[in-house]
Amino acid sequence: MTAPSSVTPLVFVTGGVVSSLGKGIAAASLAAILESRGLRVTMMKLDPYINVDPGTMSPFQHGEVYVTDDGAETDLDLGHYERFLNVRLSGRNSITTGKIYESVIAKERRGDYLGATVQVIPHITDEIKRCIDVATHGFDVALVEIGGTVGDIESLPFLEAIRQIRTDRGPEKAMFIHLTLVPWIAAAGELKTKPTQHSVKELRSIGIQPDVLLCRSEQPLPDSERRKIASFTNVSEKAVISVVDMDNIHKIPLWLHSQELDGIVVERLKLGDRARPADMAEWMDVVDAAQNPIDEVTIGVVGKYVDHQDAYKSVAEALRHGGIRQRTRVNLRWIESQDIERDGAAEVLAGLDGILVPGGFGDRGFEGKVLASRYAREQGIPYFGICYGMQAAVVDFARHVAGLEGANSTENDRQSPHPVIGLITEWRTKTGEIVRRSEDSDLGGTMRLGLQEQRLKPGTKARELYGKDVVAERHRHRYEFNNRYRTQLEEAGLVISAKSMDDLLVEMIELPDHPWFIACQAHPEFQSTPRSGHPLFIGFVRAAREKKAGGKLLKEARA
């Protein structure tokens, strides 16, 4: 069947053998190369879990919950997509099995299927295909990543749907890229191709023949192994791409381009009339800045999920971006907040050039975050609080500067005599809609979410860093600064440096008599990219450099 020319060509990216091979980064890297060739590119993630979104999933299980402009709680891979591409994604670009079934069941309840027996084929697969069409319409090419690994029962409906798309549209409108593992067996001194062969065999058993193989390995594939893999998998030898472990993820677009992966895609999907030669100059600049630093700092990240660093993926990347923009290597020291409660801040936080306290929820480890804020405040160490990190800073200031004994968040202590952080019950969205909630509201989907504007106070460090009066940042939280304490804390010396446009919600705070102490309720890490950074993270890393240098920097550095 020949697909209409208006249909967006699709590149489906699947994975095999084991999870966590890096499908998201590999797909984003390919997308970045295609974008550098002048193509309008978008990306999408299909996740096989039943949750409607990852909003209430444990960070230890899922890692980071990434938030888009429209307030969708999505898979962390969308963060990779936005950091590698010049495109803003939405909830349409992250689809779960739960979303698919939720939509189909709603239609069935309305009677949309006219009494038919609702089945995986065609109803579930049709809904998957509809979601793909909606998310990818209007682009020159779209990359669609399928979560999980081939052979998982959970991902079968997605795999069946993309098989149908290839059949419906033809090979010039849909192609398959399969990422697999080629393990190195040290005892034998050999690379093993059998896992890749069996993974492709599994794919072919459900009607999917890969067009390209991305082979993850510790070292480049020898030509002999590429030929062997090509022979066993019915994939052309030039389309067996070696993907080696990199010390810097920003090298991956350059590595894939060197093997002409983008050329294979452009040729297969007949995009040559729209694609110019790749311009990888920006990526080369990023890699050069990272590889050739002129300075180095150590930042302590005080969190509650540091045993699973994917929970702070965007924060870690944003810190590195802030370093790249000024040719500074940022070393991250991951610190469990409960260790501070047990051993004391002075011991655990010694030797740091800056302290960042990221988001989180629940009372476990919160007092450690409060202690980290206090230590940074009293010792003059640059401090950056994000979301829960801002709330910890407010609690510290209320208790130890304003003299409000027992001050706390109602999330952790409903009987607190001074609830300086409380559950917000009402706020206005960007479109002007009033959103309300209570303690009885469902946890899922009841946070203040998405891109919202805030007005910066003139004369503050925040205003200086942003360089504008009004900015927009993405939010994800349930608890906020209690307005009843605004005046009291301001009189004690706290500066409220940003508020929502209606003046009802505190967005940022800072301390004027501190080298660099800024905290924000939003999540600025979600808008940081390696090619531009983010003003707050750039400023924070610069402050850490000044702390290490013992004063003002003698010279600026730019990537």
Image: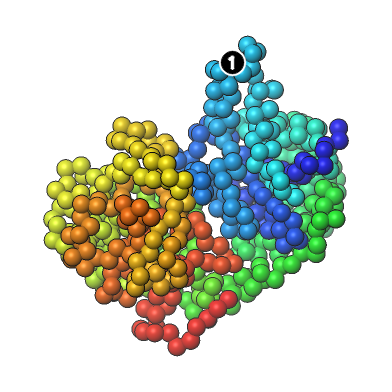
Residue at 16% x, 51% y is 418
The spot of residue 145 in percent (x, y) is: 65, 44
Crowd class of label 1 (few under 14; some 14 to 19; many from 20; radius 10 Å): few
Residue 151 shown left or right of residue 437 in the figure: right
> Closer to the camera, 5 or 330?
5
Residue 170 shown left or right of residue 353 in the figure: right
> Closer to the camera, 151 or 212?
212
- Amino acid at the residue labelled 1: Gly
> Closer to the camera, 350 or 82?
82
Q: Is residue 494 visible?
A: yes
The spot of residue 467 in percent (x, y) is: 45, 71
The spot of residue 487 in percent (x, y) is: 20, 59
> Closer to the camera, 381 or 525?
525
Assign the N terminus to one quadrant of the image.
top right
Rendering quarter of residue 520: bottom left
Residue 319 shown left or right of residue 22 in the figure: left
Which residue carries the number 1 mark?
A: 111
